Amino acid sequence: MDKVGVITSFIHNIVLLNIPLLYGTVGEIVVEKSGSLNLGVEGTMAVGAIFGYICGCYANSMIVGILTAFIAGALFGLLFAALTVSLQANQNITGLTLTTFGLGIYFFVGNGLRASGNWPTITESLKEGFSDISIPLLSDIPIIGSGFFSHNVLVYLGIAIAIFMWWYLKHTKFGLRLRAIGENPAAADSVGINVKRSKYFHICLGCGIMGIGGYYMGLNMSGSFNSSCWINGYGWIAVALVIFANWNPSIAIIGTFVFGFFNTLRVSGSSLALAFPDFLGWLADVPTQLYQALPFIITAIVLVVTSIKNKRGRSGLPAALGLNYFREER
Amino acid sequence: MRFHIVKRDNGPFWQRCCYYVVAVIAALAVGAIILASIGVNPFDYYSKMFTMGTVGNKIAYKTFMNYLKEFVPLVLTAVALSLAFKMRFWNIGGEGQFIMGAIASAWVAFQFGAYLPMAVTLIFMCIAAMLAAGIYGLIAGVLKVKFGTNETLMTLMLNYVALYVLYFIGETKADWNFFLQADSARPVFESFASVAQFPSFSLGGKFELNVTVILTVIIGVLIFFYLKYTKQGYEIGVVGDSANTAKYAGMKVNKIVLRTVFLSAALIGLASAFKVGTSGVLSTSVTNDVGWTGIIVAWLAKLSTPMIFIVSMLICVLQHGSTVAAVSFSQVDSSFANMLQGVILFLVLVADFFVRFRIVRVKKGGND
Amino acid sequence: MAEQYAIEMRNITKTFGSVVANRGIDLAVKQGEILALLGENGSGKTTLMNMLSGIYKPDSGSIFIDGKEVSIDSPEDSKKYGIGMVHQHFKLVEVFSAADNIWMGQDKTGPILKKNRFKYVEDIARKFGFDIDPRKKVYNMAVSEKQTLEIIKVLSYGAKTIILDEPTSVLTVQEIEKLFGVLRRMKEEGHAIIIITHKLNEVMDISDRVAILRKGEYITTVNTSETNEQELTEWMVGRKIDLNIDRPIVEKTRPLLEVRDLVIRNDEGSVAIDNVNFYIRGGEILGVAGIAGCGQKELCEAIAGLRPIEKGQMIHKGDNIVGLSPKAILEKGISMSFIPEDRLGMGLAPSMSITENMLLKNYRDGKGPLVDRKRGRADAEQVIKELEVVTPSSETPVRRLSGGNVQKVLLGREIKAGPNVIVTAYPVRGLDINSSYAIYNILNKQKLAGVGVLFVGEDLDVMMALCDKIMVLCHGKVMGVVHAHKTTKEELGLMMTGVLDLSEKHEDKPAGIAKDSLFESKDGEEA
């Protein structure tokens, strides 16, 4: 047995399987930083996935797929923003409905196309586009090299987006203004920041990023459509990961790998146990459901610990999260 | 020309009704456009869906019995959630509480089903489910009261923890695991003994009414009564309306919150006991998403118990009807119901806005 | 007059529902002058200024900037026109540094945050004569630092007109001196400054001209050098108007509620009520006058058991009530109907019906788990009939009633409980004349029945006509208790603003302590 190969492929899988989480998380961080709690990540990713995949296949182009997924997600964001920012609707309800609605569209379109025999199979050029690109030198590092540095283009894009959004939030004035809105919209408003416009823009942007994450999952499934959704709960893990990452996109990268580590153990734990019976043999006895539940358990603990400490300035939780802003409120 | 939004008081009842009726009709119209665009006659489809295919059908009674099986857990869950929502406690943990209740009642069914008489077994199943779900719900309640932990996110996390506990039980073959069939090589849930299943009565003809339906209606009436006429129900209303007023009136707000959260979660547990007690078997998709749909139902019904019954009936017609209609209209997937449900809720939220706010035109100042 | 004003407001009217906050107001400020905007609480000063800062839109009237008519639709517009407002409740992002709070509204700087912004902000601050730590987070700042930051903020945006909403209420004497130095310097640099205040000494000290509002209406604008405190007070509070409110003379009982050396802290942790002594007898109405935020709210909450007491004693008919729960205090018959600014925030459940609100304090009565709704409805019907509440039915949500009717429902419920002490705060705020008189009649009836009433009010005319005695608070301290029929508005006004202190003016007994106090007979059976 190729023990090194097992480790390498384990590392490779951590990245490959879990990057959609990063998209979902970074997108949700952008949305939540504007003070909006969008519980519709799952549905938003689902519409991004289905429309991105279909349009990508018909146009036979990866770029078209990515753009369509982004636009589909952003349109969902627009719906959320119109309802919560302009029409002052309850954010929890709107978000949950967005999930129901999004999954409804996903299956309606997907099953509809399959029933009529029009479901597109994945094209060669998409397969090509989703294949691994090795980074020279780095990918030659033994063991971890090809695990970390030989991936498809969407992996690199996802990490680039996360780093960019971290920089954007922390080091640009737009990010500063966005954070101000999430913390205290009245204060932001009073210095002449256009609160509504910024909220609309960032909700759409964040939801668009989620959409790309959905597209990724569709490609990773090679477009095989069955009764369980491609997104498969990743949207909800993303909501959890936002808390774990303390609303920081760069920690979200680490968080993705931490959550992804457990997620991958579920898939590859048994092969690790087989390769290293002495050290890791016990892995075979751990129920896979524990790995699946761990992200949520960890997040619940993080949630409780932060609420006990509740130290100002430390938590990235936007103070006005979940509250709608109405300027003339007396 | 600029517009300006002004808060307003609720208009008269009929006016609000009008807004909501218009919203629902508009949503159906949106659905009709979607149907027409894929070449389906919306009238044919809607008539099939809303009648659930019962017209001219010899086994219509079966459709109706199946319909009620979906209706009971949904309406009970929505009623339960409305208790917490009335208090502005965002219990979105219905899924998790439902699962915990289902596991607990299945445990009773397997452990005592063989020894105890039916009535006792069933009562034990209900109590176990209510306790398990109630305590599970209480976790988020205690954390909220003690540390101010966000209950929305907390209950959300607990949903998934519960889900994977259920998966663990459902997918693990082991000697201790009495939930699964012992003689099957693959993990398959064992069915309950017949004494652990809620009985049905024939009402003449072939239609059989399950006791859980009757019990659900009774519970609905009781909760309506509880909220409206009891001291505890009164307290829930005041705490939800204004926590300051409640304190001012000498109420112990934290105690009321915990009590209500427990009751809300326990009722969801009861819904799950009804569910597994009628289907006679556990399943990894035991919740049928009632924890989520229940939230939408409760909200659509504006947390009023009678309205929750009506909205649940309609949502179940949507869901069940679309499954039935999918048989005759192969190009329309049953997920059309979820889409339609989403559109309805969005448009009702829009209607809400017009109930709460008024748009006035602002005269542009200046000489331009 | 061909004079060019920096800002001119003409005939501005703003209403909130049925309440008129501003009616036909004219206001003008020149460059290089400090205009004081003077008025009592609720006279509409802040509302008027919020129309300049873009928070509210006027219903009618026009605004001119440098002689040109403009429309201010948002804070963005306001900033564009060079108006900066330092709000009474600071609009700062707590988790940001000082520099970032300023930086977020800067339009001219580049899109990328660089380390040099701290230096930039520090330099700007220094240019305006301030010394701040640009890296300090707002949540670590003292109140005066936050205010300084707010001022630097608006200055750095190039504000030519600066509005300060009660800037001195949170500052110490030294800090006020410093602030005034800053304002004078800004004036010399050609800024137009509007300062909202109700402290006369400060008006005299700092302003060039004074504009006075009263009850939402414009009274006058005068040059500060040509006026004096007496005259301003008279404009602010108005001439004594004979309101024709009855003041029945009632046989008074021994003290019902006595308060000794009371110290209470507010939510921010500073002392709100500072060593206060007073007592209420049955059959009298004790008025509490004072500028808003002088501890009235905290005092009412403490009496009702809703706010912990730092120090001091409260006895009711000789029994200690310090530390009792709200419920236990209710059972003693101390009924408090306390209406804060947000009328429906406390005391009533707004979306519940009149019937249900009637039950708020007695729903626990009676055995069994059920609420006695019949009784609630009977009470509701009776209150509606006796107090002439205008409502479609007893099942109408309270939220839908008009202000006066809400007030009647609240008072009606309190009176039904048969209390012997009523604490009521601003019971006629926002009500029209007729509703107000109805409320006065209700209170007088209670007085006739031997109830002791603590009336926290804001309209001095009303208090002088209605109350038997008036206690004046200033910054949590009692400035004195005067007989309502002997005092003058000027005297009250001067006490409220802290100019006059009569608390030591008692020849024969210590202030606020009854001759026949029940404190001494604590162990005695009956009073």
Image: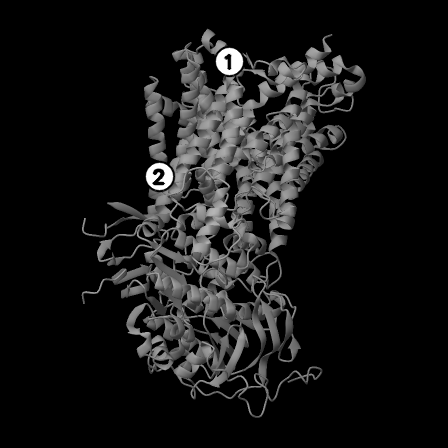
Where is residue B94? Give x, y as percent: 58, 37
Residue A299 rendering spot, x and y as whole percentages: 63, 35
With respect to residue A111, does B227 lie above or below? below
| Direction from residue B275 to residue C340 in the image, left or right | left
Reading the image, the residue beneath label 1 is A130
Q: Residue at x 54, y 54 (%)?
A: B239
* Quarter of the image where one finds residue B34: top left
Residue in view at x 70 percent, y 18 percent: A269
Do marks 1 and 2 both belong to one polypeptide chain? no
Query: How far apart in space, not on screen, are marks 1 and 2 (Cα)?
Result: 48 Å
Task: Compare residues C304 and A68 and report the one nearer the observer.
Answer: A68
Instruction: Kindly state the secondary structure of the residue where label 1 is placed.
Output: loop
Question: As shown in the figure, which amino acid type bears the numbered disc 1?
Answer: Phe
Q: Chain of mark 1?
A: A
Q: Quadrant of the N terminus of chain C?
A: bottom left
On the picture, is C280 further left or further right than B170?
left
- Asked if residue A75 is positioned above or below residue C415 in the image, the reply reads above
For this orientation, the residue located farthest to the right is A278
Which mark, by number, is residue B21? 2
Q: Amino acid at mark 2?
A: Val
Asked if one can make out residue C345 in the rendered structure from this viewpoint, the answer is: yes
Q: How many marks?
A: 2
| Of labels 1 and 2, the one closer to you | 1
The residue depicted at 54 percent of the width and 76 percent of the height is C477
Residue B121 found in image quarter: top right
Alpha-carbon neighbours of circle 1 within 10 Å: few (<14), some, or many (≥20)? some
Q: Position of residue A107 (x, y in %)?
A: 46, 21
* Residue B81 vertical placement versus C411 (above, below): above
Task: Provide the chain ID for the residue under circle 2.
Answer: B
Number of residues whose C-alpha sits closer than 10 Å to that of mark 2, classed few (under 14), some (14–19) or many (20 or more)? some
When asked about the image quadrant of residue B283, the answer is top right
